[in-house]
Image (cartoon, rainbow, N blue to C red):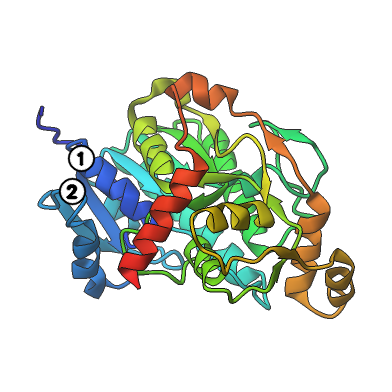
Amino acid sequence: MKINQEKVLVTGASGYIALHCIAELLKKGYRVKGSLRDLNRQDEVRKSLALEAEYEKLEFCKLNLLDNQGWEAAASDCDYLLHIASPCSIEEPTNEKQLIKPALKGTLSALKAAQKSNVKKVVLTSSIGAIAYGHSKSTCDPTDWTDTSKDVGAYIKSKTIAEKAAWDFMTNQSDTSFTMTTIHPGMVFGPLLSNAIEGMSAGLITKMISGKFLALPDIYFTVVDVRDIAKLHVESITNKQSDHKRIIATSQQAISFLEISKILRELGFNKSPQNRIPTQLINSLAIFNIGMKNTASMIKRGCYSVDTSETISLYDWDPIPFKKTLKDMTKSLKTMS
């Protein structure tokens, strides 16, 4: 393999998507600098990557989404930047600023650091949540934006606001020295590299297969394999055709919670729920509970599809079948537990 001396700064190195991105980068021969809020987690990250890639070319730096310090120094010797770190919560926070403020501040810190360094390209992890909500469009494409004036929930709002700020930054800089691509995953599933089973998708699947959910709300969302997301991030680094584009990276058709549960039952997880929570009940509870209000909003959105034709064209993308994704994920969950 040709020795690659290029270095990539990856923010939020201990995260679910970031670990897969780092593994993919190391396999491709890149040097990687991963950012952590707590440098005591270096060994944990290295251990998570031990079976996936050689990590002699991996180093770490300390960064915090809410702190401006260290960003410019971290990016100073890097050729590319994957900004993946963003706050995520299964539960709806009592104050939406808990998610919005760090998402926005961290994104702008990353872009400002890239501007002042030799970074050639920034790949920003956004979300289908920044595209498909707050409106009733049946098929969404990269030109669509979520309407944050509607009840879309704090996480979706945070991803939309942060990404809009990123594109505004790129537009307002007359001498921008780098290009940017935003990647828009749906709900991300697939094998875990760390034992962080309390994450959003891992926590959901764990509760479903263990029988902790007796029934499920009538919510639809698009899905994608974490390994596909990692490959798209890494390919975007050198894919010039992806410059200044929003890349939808998820299943073309949204599926329901119950459809996912059905696949899990087919894989042998008989405790996965078969019943649906009455929507009328959730709507009644939404009056009193912010979490239920968000759930009611997601139910109201209903089933939708997305246009991934550009993603398929630009990357020759052939997504991993979702049943294989769930099979590999549940296998890794058994290993981690």
Q: Which amino acid does label 2 sit on?
A: Ala
Estimate the x, y position of residue 12 in percent, counting from the top left. 37, 59
The answer to whether residue 162 is above or below residue 175 is below
Left or right: 263, with 40 as reference point: right
Estimate the x, y position of residue 221 in percent, counting from the top left. 66, 49
Of 117 and 48, the residue lying toward us:
48
Label 2 packing within 10 angstroms: few (<14), some (14-19), many (20+): some
Q: In which quarter of the image is residue 204?
A: bottom right
Q: Can residue 12 be seen in this view?
A: no
Left or right: 38, with 316 as reference point: left
Q: Is residue 34 visible?
A: yes
What's the mark number on residue 53? Answer: 2
Q: Mark 1 points at which residue?
A: 27
Give the SS element for disc 2.
loop
Q: Residue shown at 67%/43% (left/top)?
A: 254
What's the mark number on residue 336? Answer: none
Label 1 packing within 10 angstroms: few (<14), some (14-19), many (20+): some
Q: Residue shown at 63%/32% (left/top)?
A: 142
Q: Do the residues labelled 1 and 2 touch (CB within 8 Å)?
A: yes
Estimate the x, y position of residue 243 in percent, counting from the top left. 46, 26
Of 167 and 213, the residue lying toward us:
213
Left or right: 179, with 144 as reference point: left
Q: Which amino acid does label 1 sit on?
A: Lys
Q: Residue shown at 34%/37% (left/top)?
A: 234
